[in-house]
Amino acid sequence: MGLPAEMLPEIPVVSDPGLDRNAENLTKGQIAEVINRVIDRETAARFRIYLNTCVHCGLCSDACHWFLSNDRDPRFSPVGKVKQTLWEILKKKGRVDADFLKECSRIAQTECNGCRKCSMYCPFGVDIAYLLFVVRRICYQLTIVPQFLQDTVNSHAATMNQMWVKQDEWVDTLQWQEEDARSEIVTARIPLDKEGADVFYSVIAPEPKILAQLIGNIAQIMAVAKVDWTMPSQDGWDNSNMAMFAGDFEIMGRVERAHHEAALKLKAKRIVMGECGHAFRGAVYDGPKWLGWREPPVPVIHAVDFYHELITSGRIKIARKFEEPVTLQEPCNIVRGRGLGTKLREVIQATCADFRPPPEPDFEHNYCCGAGGGVINCGPPWKTSRVKGNSVKAEQLAATKAHIVITPCHNCHAGIEDIISGYKLGMHVRFLIEILMQVMEIPDELKAE
Amino acid sequence: MYTFVSGPLVWIAFIVFAGGMIYQFLSMLKMAKKDKVVLPYMSLKYGLRSLLHWLIPFASKNMRMRYETTLVTFAFHICLVLLPIFLTAHVVMFSASWGLHWVTVSEKAADWLTVLVIFAAIFFLVRRWMLPEVRFVTSASDYVLLAVVAAPFVTGFIAHRQWFDYETMVVIHMISGAAMLMAIPFTRLSHMLFFPFTRAYMGSEFGAVRHARDW
């Protein structure tokens, strides 16, 4: 049943040592043992009920940007991905071979962003992304993980941050950024390990590694808004979590625990996270779930919520609005994942003169950037398929004729940049903080000479 | 044969149906306790909010995107449940056996509603065949399930019209009805039982945890 394979175009073979080499020595026995262990011991109600409830209606398909962008190829529909992986696995009771498992990894790791839009399109609310995450878990336990993604997980395990940032490099970067910030605003500081601060600010590791100026920016914003804040000098400063996407939930739990414990140790009143969506998801939902917490022990808010609060409370005033036409990429994990769509628009409207909202689907229904869910962390081998898998996003952005795409998320930032260059849209990507820096009023007494 | 299908078989069908549903419900509850996140995240408010949106035609975005499927699906499910309950012939049988009475739909209306169910089943069949994304995930069991659901209506319609041999047709109708009832708890037709729970869980997670909508 179903479409005969010869009628579907071939999916280009991508070589990735994380899949190819690691699959070489796997035996069918090993594979079956791991699959049955994961299914019997780690899954329960959601897994069984979702699979028994799905009536194969295909109504989830229109939710998926991969499906829409690949000429409605049924292999990219959410249920199509489950069919090609879990249904086969269950039908064969786990007796599948290593080549099949490589396909599973490709599908679950590189062709699904776990954006969870499909669960909003399934009449039964089947969490298809969760099912594909079970596939990821199986693949991870059998070491079939794209190499670049595994490297970030190794980094989390060894350094408690995603990008192999060493302890001295972290503190050194903060000091350097504090110095830079003070050259603009005299009172700018990056207070380290301050107990009882109102705000514990955390970032993802790419900030100190390659985008250090974003930390300098927040130091200036905190100084202007006169926020009592701190950052930890030790582990726990990185709120990103690629282990969550690789299926390594043990490391995922360690990373989240370290992050929350760092804030608890400093007796911070709340955690404010920088502009990243997946990190927010890890800190607020996936991490606590795995750790057995109903809610995070310290309240967590996202940068968008924080900026909104600073602007609406008048702690930050807007001196002049950003002139260039801007549009918006709505990160799944803070819009579909936290309902921040309205606040995000309000921040943009407060700071930008020419805001062009993305055409439908928007708000909770927006298309994922294509990079989230760990897909961009699968690295350069998968870039072509990733960009091809999101032509609908390119169309949506192009329709706005904006010059700037505001993306309050690191994954979105990188993903949208790739889409812009891939489809030659001639746009630029900016974080919200970069816009804020340009439009924020700096009182004269704070300005450095 | 008629005595068997109109007597013991009906009892067997109802017992298997009810017992199966209770069994599935209890297994679900047991699994939900094992699945550590399900019960703590369940929220009556957000669960009902989501269910309400998915029980009202066109209240959710995907229903508005697929208006023909939405219309047919609602018509199909409403008739599927209500028609057998309020059909005069069925009520008469209950009345004869147990002395119970309740309102019935007119013969003519019943005829048209049956046609609607059969038309909807054909729509699903054609949809399954025509749409590549549905065809791709279709297996033989999907056709069998559709046939199991449509059979009591097709045979009931034929029997009522007294086409072919009436006695035989009524027997086939009763067997197919019993088969459908017994299949519900043990096949994907169990979505009848699971739908409120899966939707309510997703609604709870979206509402209470993510502060967002899921429709």
Image: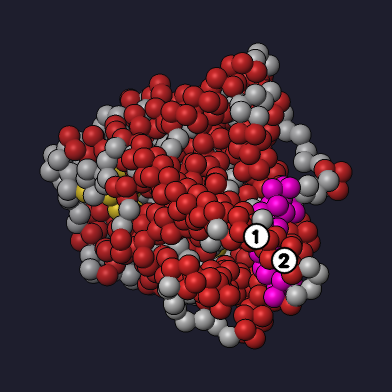
Task: Specify the amino acid type for callout 1.
Answer: Tyr
Task: Specify the amino acid type for callout 2.
Answer: Glu
**Disc 2 secondary structure class:** helix
Label 2, residues with CA under 10 Å away: few <14, some 14-19, many ≥20: few
Vertically, is A15 above or below A387?
above
Name the mark on residue B2.
1
Q: Nearer the viewer, residue A342 or A445?
A: A342
Which residue occupies 56% across, 78% down? B88
The answer to whether one can see residue B77 in this image is yes
- Horizontal and vertical percent position of residue B43: 31, 57
Q: Which residues are magenta?
A: B133-160
Label 1, residues with CA under 10 Å away: few <14, some 14-19, many ≥20: few
Q: Is residue B147 magenta?
A: yes
Q: Give the position of the N terminus of chain B as an image quadrant.
A: bottom right
- Chain of the residue that carries numbered disc 1 in the rendered image: B
- Horizontal and vertical percent position of residue A216: 34, 46
Q: CA distance from mark 2 to mark 1?
A: 8 Å
- Horizontal and vertical percent position of residue A288: 31, 41
**Viewed as shown, does residue A178 lie left or right of B60?**
left
* Residue where numbered disc 2 is placed: B167
Which residue occupies 62% across, 43% down? A82
Q: Nearer the viewer, residue A167 or B82?
A: B82
- Horizontal and vertical percent position of residue A147: 59, 27
**Viewed as shown, does residue A168 lie left or right of B183?**
left
